[in-house]
Amino acid sequence: MKVTHIYGACEIVESKGVKILFDPWLVDGEYYGSWAAYPPIDSFELNTLDGVDYIYISHTHPDHFSSLTLSKMNKKIPILIHKFPAPFLKNNIERLGFSVTEIEANEKFYLNENLHINIVPAGFCNPEMCHKSFGCGKMETNYVSSVIDSLCIVSDGTHTVMNVNDCPYPVAKFAIAKAIEEYQIDFLMVGYTGASAYPQCFANYSSEEKIEKAAGQKDYYFQSGLNYINDINPKFFMPMAGTYCLAGKLVELEKYRAVNDIKETCDSYTSSNKGSSKGILLNSLESFDLITKTQTRPYRHFTDEEKSNYYKNTLSKVKFDFEKAPTPPTERLRELCKDAYVRFEDKRASIGLSSSTEIYVALGPEEYAKFTFNENKIEFVKQIDKSRSFISFETDPKLLVLLLQGPKYAHWNNAEIGCHITFNRRPDVYERGIHYCMNYFHK
């Protein structure tokens, strides 16, 4: 069995003449243009992947289900996913022209006589664990969200690879406990950092507070990966994903992001895990052979200077597609907000949520749509009343007009992950119900 690293969370596992490609995101510009790969992948030839036999997509986020990438790939390659409670991922993959096989939880799907994949749902999504404020799944009054992520195990009877993808450890630890009852994991692909708008997109923090809170987040992400390694005790592990960076005008947020260094983290995991697990790092298109326990070439880490130059000379010059559109008239945004509020209020009422926090959506530098859970009305004001509890959402009006037209055009959750939204809240308290209902603030 052999593992080949492509980029980020994109890997190939090869055994018994079968190649499985994981989560191909190989085109810059997901999350409405803001996510870019580092090291750069702009010269990657997607047709080199035509020979893979299967594609596994772990979940719906664009850095794992990348429509920009899949639209340019061979549509004859079958795609494997978990059978999620809602068909959102399946439907979107099929719209791109692929055939999709949904696999039930813990069902062994054989890729040939000896090789199988086992896709395991990660439990229940909780945005307070993954630090994505809007959340990704269905929320009921008991604040339980639906499954939106999965991990997988690939085994050929001799060697076994596990990929935990983006699953937060507190959510997936029960699935892990069940999996390791049956499998001895030889090679673990594990996350080592996270992706959210916190703290860099929060205007209620000073620069010093953002740096301090980012340090706490980095510790959280580090410990999550280490918990996986300690519980699973693989022979080898490879930190993966998390090597993206922000492009365009959002480059200035990089200094506040909670991002661990992949090499430092790998070295720390090797020295501090409870077992004898050994860390492996691979550059793009390099491989690790589980039989010979060797990799094709030693890993070369990028330097801070190289990355800084790439930010300055390349990424800072990127223009997002929505920025090329004309600025929408404020009246257009007002009308869309009125329609969006009806849908927002319907969702709020259906799950019986209540809050006195005032909600503001910036339409421009001097106008906001204002509403609450309790007054059943929307109004337009010139400024935020900071004497009361409030939360505000501010984004480029050119993106806002898309968000207000609905997920077909843009989705609040993805805009958040892409760091396109600036939040401001007082007190500094996360109200899950507000963020959940804001997912429905569109026509």
Image (cartoon, helix red, strand yellow):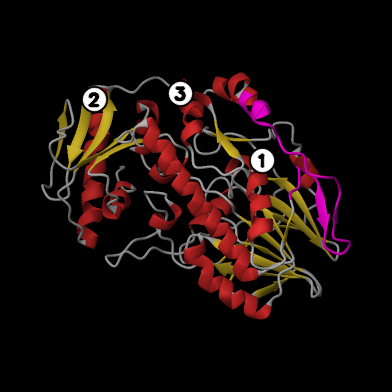
Between 241 and 254, the one lying in front of the other is 254
Image position, residue 404 (x, y; %): 33, 37
Between 49 and 362, the one lying in front of the other is 362
Up/down of 413 relative to 161, above or below: above
Q: Amino acid at mark 3?
A: Glu
Residue in view at x 75 percent, y 67 percent: 186
Q: Does the magenta-highlighted stretch encompass residue 417? A: no
Between 107 and 40, the one lying in front of the other is 40
Q: Which mark is residue 26?
A: 1
SS for callout 1: loop
User: Going by the picture, which residue comes out furthest to the right?
Assistant: 292
SS for callout 2: helix
Question: Which residue carries the number 3 mark?
Answer: 323
Image position, residue 307 (x, y; %): 64, 29
Image position, residue 120 (x, y; %): 58, 69
Mark toward the start of the polypeptide (2 vs 1)? 1
Residues shaded magenta: 281-308
